[in-house]
Amino acid sequence: MININRRGFLKTGIAGAAGIVALSPSIVSAATTDQHSDIISRTLGKTGMKIPVISFGVMRADNPNLCKAAYEKGIKLFDTANGYQNGNNEIMLGNLLKDYPRSSFYLATKVKPAGVDKEGKPTDQTTAEDFLAKFNTSLSRLKMDYVDILYIHDIRNPEMLAYKPIINAVKNLKKEGKVKFIGFSTHANEPLVIDAAAAMDTWDVILTSYNFKQTYINELNSAIKKANQAGIGIVAMKTMAGGGFLDKEKTKPINSAAALKWVLSNPDITTTIPGMTDFDQLDLNIKILSDISITEQEKKDLFIASAEKGLYCTGCTICLNACTMNLPVPDLMRAYMYAYGYSNPSMAYSLLSELGTNDNPCKECSSCKVECTKKFDIKEKIADISRLVNVPADFLT
Amino acid sequence: MNNKILIAFSLIILSGSVIAQDIHMPDLKGYKKYNNYPVFLPANLWDFINGAADTYLSYGFVDLHVVEYKKGKDVIKLEIYKHTDNTMAFGIYSTERSPSFRFLNLGSQGYITDGAINFFKGNYYVKIRTYSKNANTLKSTESLSVKVANMLSGGSEMPSALSMFPESGKKINEETYINESVLGHKFLNQAFKATYEAGTDIFSVFIMQKNSSEEARKSVGDYLTSAGAEPVDSEIGRYMLKDGYNGTIFLAWKDNRIVIISGLSKDQSDVADSYTTEILK
């Protein structure tokens, strides 16, 4: 069969073991309703949209065939954003979905208002004009007349929920039919923001961070419950706690199926949007579409993972007010991470030199008042990394 | 000295890494500089760019420095993303590049679009943005981009691997680098990709340069196995295979180099043959 020296390509005519034979869009749409009867779907609040519990966070996908396979296996909601891959993500999705019946899938995109400051408050640059221009660009890239859900991207301050120029703009888009339902995404201060939104009649959907490692999960659950009771549909993201691994070296993978099932154990969550970049991930997630029961082993995996602190300081800066020596604790934690996380002590040395801290900055302090939100032993880590300043720089090159 | 640091020190010597330094953001005439942001790391990049962070992380993101320049109501935001190496910096840059942008001779390559200037140089990917329509502010944005490009270390060349792509039919400024899961397959990674147009056909060519011929054979073997074929223990070969997800694939390899062509039909093996021959010669 094989003659590798001859010019020309040898043929293997067998479809991939894990593969499916590609079907044309029209054949697929006719087949999907019957093929996926075991899929667990939930209703997205007052929108009435019935959505499978697993949706597709398209943000990293660069292969339309992956989205196509997801569609063919029963995933209905595809989630992208104006900013993902600088628009290339929407273009890829638009080129694919234009060939499918519009009623056979749901499409969500996100637009981030310009000029929102660090506290999440609008500024003079936060205009409806800019927001609408971005949305129209998205619609054009997606080759659609409308999107099912438009999220205002990244609301972290309740003040933004009532910011008329943007709110009126999205309401008008809904009236014009360019948007079926309006919502927002939130990645910080989620309980506060969701709680405030639940008391308003503006919102149809909220896309929120939600995972087993969140330290404020009780507050978040309460806010979600309240929003749900107000008819707002809840979609979960960041379900892998910000990545598929617990460490930078990628030696400690999160049990992704367990993490997703944990999210779906909350009946107030309608669907999740895990990011997928390969067919193995897709197949794993497809299994969850029809089985969200969490096994004892999965519970154990999550318990172990939730106890993992990792090396990374999240930069919350709460420690800055607590440290009586006014030390730049987040920067020192960064130096620690450079040395031990990246195995790059010279990078840590460079940072310590810039900070100007000595070899034992906690020396004058008898007891540490800093309570790290990540439960780091701050004093121990500072003492450890600070000794690096005594190492001659040449020795580290 | 602390044992852990000694171990880390040994690792750095072995890996040949260079000293990294914190970035000193340049001044901009007439503007006040505000360093109100923390240095973002892999753990908190999400706090700054939300869901887009995953893509940056997949391209070896190291850290991000952000500074704002303000003059009256006008704001220019500068973001300097550091990645593990030049290929990764090109990779993330290329995922956000569109051939429709106006390209600039800035760093290795840059472009300007709608108040934003993005470029990459060395290990860095730089994004500069203003929402102002003021012509002077836009001009300041351009002068800032030049300052930053001059300030950053690293060469200004494009990744040398791009020169392996044949020029005939290649779509300009559409080359990318895919670090993980090429064509959606977990076992295929680290490929440069170019898009070609021949008549009405549009197809993609992927080139993977592995560290050794053994490594190349392993990747080829994994792909053939997934397509239901026997893996081949040879340093050279050409196959046309039916990928259950991606359709007809032309796969060729020689020594440590692999070429994959996707988007051509099975009766276009002569086209695939000419491209793979040129790349593997």
Image: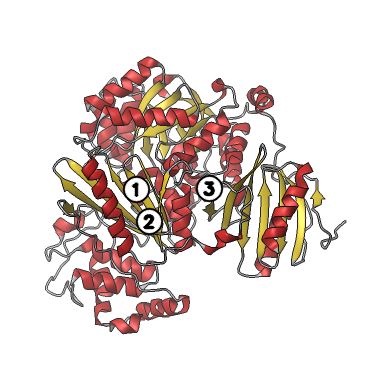
Query: Residue B33 appears in which quarter of the rendering?
Result: bottom left
Q: Residue B235 carries which label?
A: none
Q: Name the residue under label 3.
A: B174
Query: Of label 1 and label 3, which has the lower sequence position?
Result: 1
Q: Mark 2 points at which residue?
A: B106
Q: Are marks 2 and 1 in contact (CB under 8 Å)?
A: yes
Identify which residue is drawn at 25% across, 57% down. Answer: A372
- At x 31%, y 40%, the residue is A218
Chain under label 3? B
- Could you confirm whether marks 1 and 3 are on the same chain? yes
- Position of residue A249 relative to residue B246, above or below, is below
Secondary structure beneath label 2: loop
Residue A145 point in image, percent of width and height: 47, 21
Which of B44 and B137 lies nearest the eye of the viewer? B137
Parent chain of label 2: B
Locate the N terminus of chain A by quadrant.
bottom right
Determine the residue positioned at 36% across, 32% down.
A134
| Helix, strand or loop status at disc 1 | strand
* Mark 1 crowd level (few <14, some 14–19, many ≥20, 10 Å Cα): many
Q: How far apart are marks 1 and 3 (CA)?
A: 18 Å
Classify 10 Å Cα crowding around label 3: few (below 14), some (14-19), many (20 and above).
Answer: some
Q: How far apart are marks 3 and 2 (CA)?
A: 18 Å
Q: Which mark is residue B117?
A: 1
Q: Which chain carries label 1?
A: B
In the picture, which quadrant includes the C terminus of chain A?
bottom left
Separation of disc 2 and disc 1 at Cα? Answer: 10 Å
Identified by mark 3, the residue type is Glu
Query: What amino acid does circle 2 point to?
Result: Leu
List x then y, in percent, for residue A123. 19, 36
On screen, B104 above or below A170?
below
Point out the tag, 2 or 1, that comes first from the N-terminus.
Answer: 2
Crowdedness of circle 2 by 10 Å Cα count: few (<14), some, many (20+)? some
